[in-house]
């Protein structure tokens, strides 16, 4: 067996690179469809061989070459046929599906907003109750403070130092 020429090695690496790009693109397309409830979110929902090539960053003519025409292109076409059976196709169908999804999300939003408003109202009532209690306590403490000041002013001023009370004569 003779060693391969550098040209043949380079050619094989390019072919392998095309296959890798196509596999990654196909996986990304499947993920996009799964994430979007069975709708392909790009190219107006149309999924074709050219779209797969665009996503793989290869030119669609690449699959016309003798290396890929009977192998890679056939595999990608079969994959597309299988995928197109499960994907929603057609402008009206896609529009209905998108509208239904948007309506569902709008309803979810309104439900969350309603619950938030209810929680906010309950929280406001609770905070107002706590505020009223705090104001009442402040009023009680202020009146107690005034009463204690009056008692001190009647008896005279005393300094407290080291735990002992000393009368300040002024």
Image: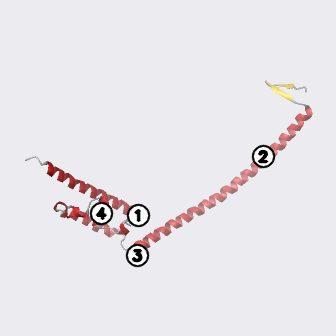
Measure the alpha-carbon separation of dots 2 and 1. Answer: 57 Å
Task: State if disc 4 and disc 3 touch (CB < 8 Å).
Answer: no
Residue 160 in percent (x, y) is at 82, 27
Task: State if disc 1 and disc 3 touch (CB < 8 Å).
Answer: no
Residue name at image x 54 percent, y 64 percent: 109
Label whose residue precedes the other's in the sequence (2 or 1): 1
Q: Is residue 28 above or below residue 85?
A: above
Asked if residue 44 lies left or right of residue 66, the reply is right
Label whose residue precedes the other's in the sequence (4 or 2): 4
Q: Which residue is disc 1 drawn over?
A: 36
Q: Classify residue 57 by image quadrant.
A: bottom left
Residue 65 in percent (x, y) is at 18, 62
Disc on res. 52: 4
- In what element is the residue under mark 1? loop
- In what element is the residue under mark 2? helix
Measure the alpha-carbon separation of dots 3 and 4. Answer: 23 Å
Q: Tell me the quarter of the image containing the C terminus.
A: top right
Q: Classify residue 123 by image quadrant.
A: bottom right
Measure the alpha-carbon separation of dots 3 and 2. Answer: 67 Å
Residue name at image x 29 percent, y 59 percent: 56
Measure the alpha-carbon separation of dots 1 and 4. Answer: 17 Å
Q: Which residue is disc 3 drawn over?
A: 92
Alpha-carbon neighbours of circle 1 within 10 Å: few (<14), some, or many (≥20)? few
Single out the mark in the foreground, 2 or 1. Answer: 1
Disc on res. 137: 2
Task: State if disc 2 and disc 3 touch (CB < 8 Å).
Answer: no
Observer-nearest of 27 and 164:
27
Asked if residue 150 lies left or right of residue 108, the reply is right
Alpha-carbon neighbours of circle 3 within 10 Å: few (<14), some, or many (≥20)? few
Single out the mark in the foreground, 4 or 2. Answer: 4
Measure the alpha-carbon separation of dots 3 and 1. Answer: 17 Å
Residue 156 in percent (x, y) is at 90, 31
């Amino acid at each position: 067996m003779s060693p391969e020429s550098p040209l043949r090695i380079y050619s094989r690496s390019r072919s392998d690179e095309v296959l890798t790009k196509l596999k990654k693109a196909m996986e990304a397309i499947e993920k996009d469809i799964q994430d979007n409830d069975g709708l392909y979110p790009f190219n107006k929902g149309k999924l074709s061989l050219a779209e797969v090539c665009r996503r793989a960053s290869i030119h669609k003519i690449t699959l016309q070459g003798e290396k890929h025409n009977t192998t890679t292109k056939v595999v990608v076409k079969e994959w597309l046929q299988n995928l197109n059976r499960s994907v929603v196709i057609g402008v009206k169908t896609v529009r209905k599906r998108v509208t239904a999804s948007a309506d569902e999300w709008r309803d979810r939003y309104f439900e969350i907003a309603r619950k938030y408003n209810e929680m906010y109202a309950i929280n406001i009532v609770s905070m107002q109750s706590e505020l009223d209690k705090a104001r009442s306590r402040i009023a009680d403490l202020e009146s107690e403070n005034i009463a204690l000041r009056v008692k001190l002013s009647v008896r005279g001023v005393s300094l407290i130092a080291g735990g002992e009370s000393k009368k300040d004569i002024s």
